Amino acid sequence: MKKKIIIGLAALAIIATTMTSCGRQGDDYITLHMWHIFGDVGRGEPMQEAARRFEAANPGVRVVITTEANDPYKIRLRTISAANFPDVFHSWGGGWLQSFVDAGFVADITDEVNAVLHLTNPEMVALSNFGGRNFGIPYIAASTILYYNTEIFARLGLSAPQTFSELEHVANVLMANGIIPFAEANLTMWPGAQHFVLLSMRLGGSDVFERANRGEIPFTYPAFIRAGEMVGEMVNAGWFPSGVNGLNWDTGQSRIMFYTEQAAMILQTSAFLGIARNENRDFYDSRLGLSLFPAIEGSPGQMTDILGGANTFSVSAHSSHPELAKALAIFMATDPQLQQTFLDNGFVAARTGLNPPDALVATALDQLAGATGFQAFVDQALSPMLSDTHRSTVQGLFGGTLTSGQAADAMQSTFDEFGGDFL
């Protein structure tokens, strides 16, 4: 019996696939396991609903979704065998995904991605392209944004800083009025790393990490050393809350500081738009401003050099139902109903050509479209060993347990021992 795999209205004519298989085998369903990291209502629930639509279009198929928090998810995937990999799994592309590709865990989905390339963001697709082949498709795009409380800024006569000198002025005025400049929670290490990465990019150019990862410059390059020093100076000046490394982004500790006006700024990914929209709609509608991390005078990096990435779906090379698994991954990335729902909930959809629901989401999309340079999130772009060292050394900078030189030496030592992956 031949069965049509239907993967989305917009892409149906292009990539619907006919496979020789019955949806049911006796009384059994064909079960596809899909893992991702989003349990929130703005992303998790719409994906559940999309999975039900995929099932309805493919009778006899059942999609079982498992969600887990970011860091435990990474650990889980790194410690299971290829045979136990889910059929479809969340990824970020970059060196993190490439390590699984090199180990033979990930299916090549180049043909499927090429069929829908016109529907999605090419910068995000490139993050999962290795050796000219695609091993993932983006379903949500992301970038790091400087968020600020417009009400506090207006009350104190401040404007969004365009240069680091202006940021210093903003921070000093805020502290003089008893307000923490940046809400930050760095227990999971990646939130604080965004400060270090953007400082490095502003000091050394948008490609400074790519150059280091290719071995063209060392991780002890002056831009990295100075960025680490600046993180320490910001911590010592009181720009972040006390005990920053013990505060947890996942449980909302930094967001609460921002919502309650204990802090006036937060440096976070564009996912914060959707989170804030669902957690505190009044704040989102009336007090949330968006900018980019400022340029540093006399340095090559530009304010419009973007730090960003993608949430992608990849397919297990060992799936028992590879064509269905590929169809499910493509469906989640291109289904117009799901993708528009992401936008409506405040998240930056990877699919192009959809209408943003409000000015804030439109601004985030415009920032990505106007990027003069692009760096993938470093903890995801680097190889796993180098990423681990990157995150732990930046946490050491925030905690004052490492000097900038020590952090840079640790990165270079890890690179010398394990090498890097293409960014």
Image (cartoon, helix red, strand yellow):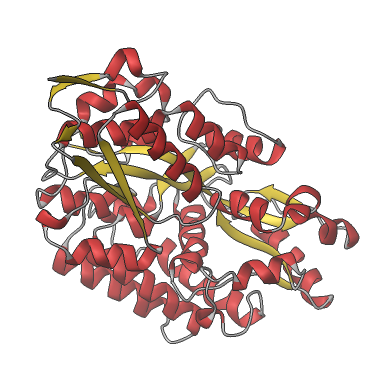
Does residue 383 lie above or below 352 as drawn?
below
Q: Viewed as shown, does residue 179 lie left or right of 32?
A: right
Look at the image and tell me in which quarter the N terminus lies. top left
Where's residue 365, x and y in %?
A: 58, 35
Along the viewing direction, whichever of 150 and 25 lies nearer the viewer: 25
Location of residue 256 (image quadrant): bottom right
Number of labelled discs? 0
Does residue 49 lie above or below 210 as drawn?
above
Location of residue 347 (image quadrant): top right
Q: Viewed as shown, does residue 75 lie left or right of 335?
A: left
Q: Residue furthest top?
A: 13
Q: Viewed as shown, does residue 225 lie left or right of 301?
A: left
Where's residue 414, x and y in %?
A: 22, 70
**Residue at left offset 68%, top offset 48%:** 290
Along the viewing direction, whichever of 176 and 336 lies nearer the viewer: 336
Is residue 163 among the parts visible in the rendering? no
**Residue at left offset 22%, top offset 39%:** 135
Does residue 149 lie above or below 207 as drawn?
below
Where's residue 390, x and y in %?
A: 35, 68
Along the viewing direction, whichever of 332 and 166 lies nearer the viewer: 332
Location of residue 107 (image quadrant): top left
**Residue at left offset 42%, top offset 23%:** 119
Where's residue 217, x and y in %?
A: 29, 56
Along the viewing direction, whichever of 255 and 415 lies nearer the viewer: 255
Q: Residue furthest front?
A: 27
